[in-house]
Amino acid sequence: MRLIALVAVVLAALPGVLTAQELYTVSPASLTEWKAVYGRIEARDQIPARARLGGTLKRLDVTEGDRVSTGQDLARIIDDKLEFRLSALDARSEALQSQLRNAEAELERGEALLERGVTTAQRLDALRTDVNVLRNELDGVQADRRVIEQQVTEGTVLAPLEGRVLDVPVTEGAVVMPGEVVAMIGGNGFFLRLAVPERHANFLVEGDSIQIEEQGASQSGTLARIYPQIENGRVVADVEVPNLSDAFVNKRVLVRLPVATREALVVPEKALITRAGLDYVEVTEGDETILRSVLPGQRHVIEGRDMVEIVTGVRAGEKVVVGDE
């Protein structure tokens, strides 16, 4: 046993004698070509919160950047004419109620007189008609009042969806018209929108993984949608990114898109040896190893392992020595 251990130590110390675990067979690998473009952070839905009533904006409770929930009260619009119309309808309602009470009293007297034979049935029918007409007029006035009350409630501007306030184009005290935008709300998630040169359109595939760099950190997204219409020589595409920050909508973010694939020779990054500014790898030739100068290229991560592309210096099928990882 001691002899075997001694032989192993001697073999390990000798250059040119390798174990199988230390060798890597150089073979072509399929590498992805990435195109650097800028994408903009946009809201999936941008819906305006509009004024349903024309009048004066008496209260404005939100500003740009605020978060809102669906149905939240954003602003209050008041039309003074509606209060006057309500007062007029209330006065008319009181007058009709007085007329109705008088007509009902006349009808009761007419019924009593008819029983004694003092009045005619025709006169009694006329009194009943007057009562019915007044009741219907009173119902109409009350219906008109409910319409005005509904218009008053429509002076409250509500958030159409949950999200962030992107723009508030009005100020408190301004006169707004029905349908005018009070606030623009962005919600239902945020995504990156890209404009890619059309020469790369055929290489874009929905579902591809996309690399995103923001504030020095790198994360991945998914190419969710590619729009078929080309505008100004560019293809528009959407990228879904989990936990994408919505602090700045329309912010530009660096994105790297897979636009092509190519074959290249790669070796583990640990196989590179740098001496005096030159890069080498140890290549086996028979039972020995030689130190060969190589020209490394781009770094890649393949199946979770750090690899480096070798532009020249090695051939496919050769075995290189990999250092301790």
Image: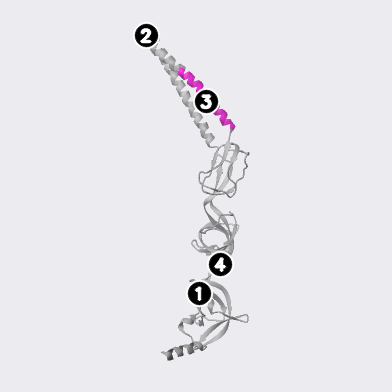
In contact (CB < 8 Å): disc 4 and disc 2: no
Q: Are marks 4 and 3 in contact (CB under 8 Å)?
A: no
Judge whether residue 86 can be spotted in this image.
Answer: yes
Q: Indicate which label's residue lies in the foreground, 4 or 2.
A: 2
Left or right, residue 277 beside residue 32: right
Tally of marks? 4
Where are the magenta residues, as a range? 80-101
Quick check: 201 above or below 114?
below
Task: Name the amino acid type tagged 4.
Answer: Trp
Q: Which residue is mark 4?
A: 34
Q: Amino acid at mark 2?
A: Arg
The residue indicated by pointer 2 is 116
Residue pointed to by mark 3: 90
CB within 8 Å, label 2 to label 3? no
The residue carrying mark 1 is: 29
Q: From this viewpoint, is residue 126 visible? A: no
Residue sitting at the far bottom? 3
Q: What crowding class fits label 2: few (fewer than 14 Cα within 10 Å), some (14-19), or many (20 or more)?
A: few
Q: Compute the Cα span from label 2 to label 3.
A: 40 Å
At mark 2, the secondary structure is: helix
